[in-house]
Amino acid sequence: MNKVHELQKMTEEELLEYGVLIETTISSLLIESKSSSPTRSNQAGMRLDSWDKKQRELNDFLYKKG
């Protein structure tokens, strides 16, 4: 998996910052997904899937590492 290889290159601090970025982005997308604009809400939902996947990959990597 290419993503695991990228995560292996990161320092502990970079992994922490990446985790914070993911959590912040997901929080923002959850707010956007409740928008009264159907287009904005749908786009946020589609992007949310991608960021959820990134979070799962990071969590799996950290679980296996630790």
Image (cartoon, rainbow, N blue to C red):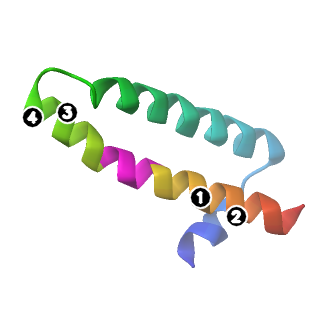
Residue linked to disc 3: 41
Q: Earlier in the sequence, mark 3 or mark 2?
A: 3
Check disc 2 and report its element: helix, strand or loop: helix
Q: Is residue 60 above or below residue 16?
A: below
User: Residue beneath label 1, please?
Assistant: 56
* Residue 50 image point, x, y percent: 39, 54
Q: Position of residue 52 (x, y in %)?
A: 48, 51
Kindly report the secondary structure that dominates the magenta region of the rendered protein.
Answer: helix
Q: CA distance from mark 3 to mark 4?
A: 5 Å
Three-letter code, disc 2 = Asp
CB of mark 3 within 8 Å of CB of mark 4? Answer: yes
Image quarter where the C terminus lies is bottom right
Residue at the image position 10 percent from the left and 24 percent from the top: 37
The crowding category of the residue bearing disc 4, from other C-alpha atoms within 10 Å (few below 14, some 14 to 19, many at least 20), is: few
Looking at the image, tell me whether mark 1 or mark 4 is earlier in sequence order: 4
Q: Is residue 2 left or right of residue 46?
A: right
